[in-house]
Amino acid sequence: MLKGISAVLSPELLKILAEMGHGDEIVLADAHFPGHTFCEKVLRMDGIQIPDLLDGILPLFELDEYVDSPVFMMQAVPGDELDPEVGKAYRVPIDKHAAGTPDYQLVERFAFYEQAKKAYACVLTGSTMKYGNIILKKGVTPIA
């Protein structure tokens, strides 16, 4: 156990976050996401919810400030609706740890899959929130 690091972060996830460079992306996926189909590097965290994971990751992970939005969420398919509570639940840790981050960018389902293919890693969670998938783009860690 390390002091100051959330207990929801596994050693494998900490390694992945440390390996990622500026502009790399990580997918935090719901339990329904076909991560093994689209992602080369997959980490399973079935017992973890995405808001808790965001709350653990964001104190350690700078979001990219050089893009319109460093946060992406899957758009609902035509005829379906997004639950606004999902985005609100994600904004809580984002606003807590990365205040001023622009709102998430909605990405069409199949375009989201294509973006996930290029991501550094995909974390499959236990979240069952419909359209609960989110992608974070890593930024530059400021020099202390």
Image (tube, rainbow, N blue to C red):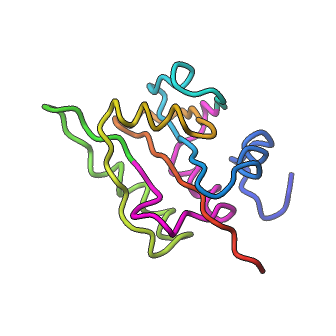
Asked which quadrant contains residue 63, the reply is bottom right
Residue 130 falls left or right of residue 43: left
Residue 130 position in % (x across, y down): 34, 35
**Residue placed most toward the observer, 92 or 26:** 26
Residue 61 position in % (x across, y down): 65, 61
Asked which quadrant contains residue 111, the reply is top left
Q: Is residue 90 magenta?
A: no
**Residue placed most toward the observer, 33 or 120:** 120
36 vs 89: above or below: above
**Residue placed most toward the observer, 120 or 14:** 120
Residue 92 position in % (x across, y down): 45, 63
**Residue placed most toward the observer, 101 or 114:** 114
Question: Which is the main secondary structure of the residues drawn in magenta?
Answer: loop
Residue 7 falls left or right of residue 3: left
Residue 107 position in % (x across, y down): 33, 43
Name the quarter where the C terminus is drawn: bottom right
Residue in the picture at 22% in, 32% down: 77
Residue 40 falls left or right of residue 110: right
Residue in the picture at 60% in, 36% down: 123
Write down the region rendered in magenta.
45-72
Q: Residue furthest top?
A: 37
36 vs 91: above or below: above
Q: Residue furthest bottom?
A: 144
96 vs 41: above or below: below
Residue in the picture at 36% in, 63% down: 103
